[in-house]
Each structure stands twice: as structure tokens, then as C-alpha cells.
Image: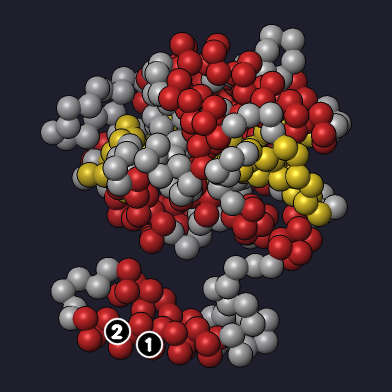
Amino acid sequence: MAGVAPEVATRLAELAGVLAHPGDRDSGTVLRLTHEWDELVNRARTLPGFERFLLRPKADRLVKELGDRTVVVLNAASTRCDALIVSGNGVEVVPLPVTPDEVVAATETTRGPAHRALPEVLPWLWEKVARPVLDALSPPQGSPLWWCPTGSFTLLPVHAAGTGDDGVHHRVVSSYTSTVTALVRAIGQPRRPGGAAVFVGVDHPPGSDLAVLSAVPQEESSFKNSVRRRLDEFLGARATKDAVRTAAASAAVLHLACHARPSPEHPRDSGLELWDGRLTISELADGLTTSPDLVYLSACHSAASGPKLPDEAFSIAAAFLTSGSRNVIGTLWDVGDREAATVASDFYEVLHRSGDPARAPRRGGPVARAVPQATGGLGSLRAHG
């Protein structure tokens, strides 16, 4: 819009910032600014090509823009569960042989340690959810597939479902998206061929009671040896909230090695523990209008939604994906410091052989394929985008 009506675009950006954080402005001022916002949005919709500005895209348009990609939306209603297979052929509904209460019970199991939860949950998840979908799809082996879980399904590792003989990672290359719209937006996001590779490392925020992440230097070394572009590093005191947000706005690749803290009661307050405090999901969502091509979140729970509000796509990974990142990697559970560094090293080694991640194909690219190779197909790590 900036190229068509720059004054409208500029004022909308100003109003968005003010209305998101009204501060001590009185209610009359906020009401006046809200009316101005509405008038500008209506004005924008009179411009050619902007008729549906800030409106939800129509379903037929979303299907068209997916191209040859397939998204599986997992939905738990009040009395039944279904998978909606969304592709260029339209939408196909696959009833799932599981009740909403059984899905909730499975999520309770996953709240324990991953090494105990996975052996119990993954075979069940395969028989009740993933296998019926893949049997209905019959995709060629190794095809890319995007999972879009909703509700309680967001807390389950569908990508890792399976038994010893068969499973999701045997059949397809899995990625996740928080919404179909977010995936479509990421597809159309321009690449950043000149952007930097940015590494952010905070082993121990000042004054915190968090454990020291002694393997951060190992992750840094793996990252430096694998990227093929200009490198910017924000370590220790340099890794402030403002610095990271500024770097993320122009980076092509972003790797964050730090602690993350979930906030179950207020999911938007979950975030990354940086040198000068927590960079929350809310701050990420409000501050990022564009996002790196690849974001690697080497931090606990970075891809997990809050159990209190599973219907809302609130996770650190989702914030980057919604901002336009084509590939986001995060974790569902706690992950050991050294294990995280080992997986990151293996991931970048695989990716290095595949080429520059920022130039990866938009469909089933090397990022999604590198994740199961680095983790052995199982575990809490998952790719988005």
C-alpha cells in the first residue's frame, strides 16, 4: 500500500502502534483514534487491489494460493474429531476414530517428561489421527505435508506419530502452520538474498535463577561453520530485546540459543529470556512486520501453545511464522542443553550439504527434510512453514 497511498499506509502504521499501546490516553482520545482507523481502513478498501484489506481471505482464494501444497487441519469439536484435507482439489473431511475427551487425555500425558510420554502417545496418535489421514491421502513417499492442528491437537507431536515399523516420518516430510492463511502469507513472502545470518546466544540472563547453558558456544560454532553469508552475532550483553528485534527485521537466517519461559495463564507473555529481560510473544507479534526466511529456536517450549488456551495459536514459533518466516524450528518440551546443541549441529550439517536455507525451495525444501534427519524422525523438535 505504501506505493499506492503512502499517506494512508503511514497513518495506519502510526495508529496501529498507538492503539496497541494506548498508555495513559483517555477513553475519548482512544475512541477518536479508533474512528480514524476505521475511516482509513474503509478508504484503503476503495483502492484497486485492496478491496479486502484486513479482511479474512476467502476460502476459494486460499485453496488457489496453496498451489500443489496440502494442509491437514486437525479439528476437535464438542462431540467428534475430524481432519480437513485442504489442497488444490478443495477440502476433504476425514472423520477421526477418536473423541475430543481422548485427545485431551493424551495432552495430559504429554505434560510429563518427553522420554516417558512419547512411547505411550506416539503409537496411539498414529492409529487414531495420523494414519487415517495418510491412508486417505495416499501421498507419494517423501511428499511434503503441512499439519495445522487446532484446539488440543496443538499440544500433540503429530509429526512424530508412529510405531517402529511405520509412522508419519516414513511416509511424508512434515511441517506445521498455525493457520492456512499464515502458510499462504509465508509462501508469498519475498526472500532476503542479501540478509545476514544472525546468531543470538544468552547462556545466563543476569540475576536469573535459570541454569547456565554451557553448550551455547557449541551451537555458535556449528552455526558459523554452516552459514554462507554475512554473519552478525549478539552474545551476552549484546543480546538485548531491541537489538534482536532490529536484527530479525532484516536477517535472512536467525538462530536463537537461550532460555524460553512459558506463561500458561497468559500465553502472550511467554517468550525468550534475553540479556535485558523477556522478549514476549506479544512484543514479537507487535514488533515484527517481516521475519527471517529461517528461524531456529533452540529454546524449551518454543513451539508449544499454552494448555490454558490451546485454541489460540500462541507460541514463539507461531509469532515468527505469522510475521512471514517460511521456515521456523522450535521445541514442544524441555530439551537438554547438550542435546539441543547436538541436534543443532546435525541440522546445520545436513542443511550445509543442501545449500543456503534462505534460498531453499518453497515446497518441501531442505529445512523440513533436515529436521527428521537431525532428530532421527522422533523427538520434540518440529519445523513450521
The relative height of residue 287 versus residue 219 in the rendered view (above or below) is below
Query: Looking at the rendered structure, which numbered label has been put on residue 224?
Result: none
Please say whether residue 30 is visible from this viewpoint. yes
The relative height of residue 354 versus residue 268 in the rendered view (above or below) is above
Q: Position of residue 268 (x, y in %)?
A: 34, 49
The relative height of residue 303 versus residue 4 in the rendered view (above or below) is above
Pointer 1 residue: 35
**Kind of residue indicated by mark 1:** His
Q: Nearer the viewer, residue 207 or 26?
A: 26
The answer for how far apart the CA atoms under marks 1 and 2 are is: 6 Å
- Judged from this view, the residue extending furthest toward the left is 207
- Judged from this view, the residue extending furthest toward the front is 79
Left or right: where does residue 14 sit relative to residue 75? left
Left or right: where does residue 136 sit relative to residue 153? right
Please say whether residue 224 is visible from this viewpoint. no
Pointer 2 residue: 31
Left or right: where does residue 22 sit relative to residue 272? left
Q: Position of residue 171 (x, y in %)?
A: 77, 25
Q: Nearer the viewer, residue 252 or 109?
A: 109
| Mark 2 neighbour class, 10 Å CA radius: few under 14, some 14 to 19, many 20 or more | few
Q: Quadrant of residue 122?
A: top right
Residue drawn 32% across the image and 74% down it: 19
Are dots 1 and 2 in contact, CB under 8 Å? Answer: yes
SS assignment at label 1 = helix
Which image quadrant: the N terminus? bottom right
Residue drawn 58% across the image and 73% down it: 55
Residue drawn 82% across the image and 34% down it: 136
| Mark 1 neighbour class, 10 Å CA radius: few under 14, some 14 to 19, many 20 or more | few
Residue drawn 75% across the image and 20% down it: 170
SS assignment at label 2 = helix
**Kind of residue indicated by mark 2:** Leu
Q: Position of residue 191 (x, y in %)?
A: 63, 56
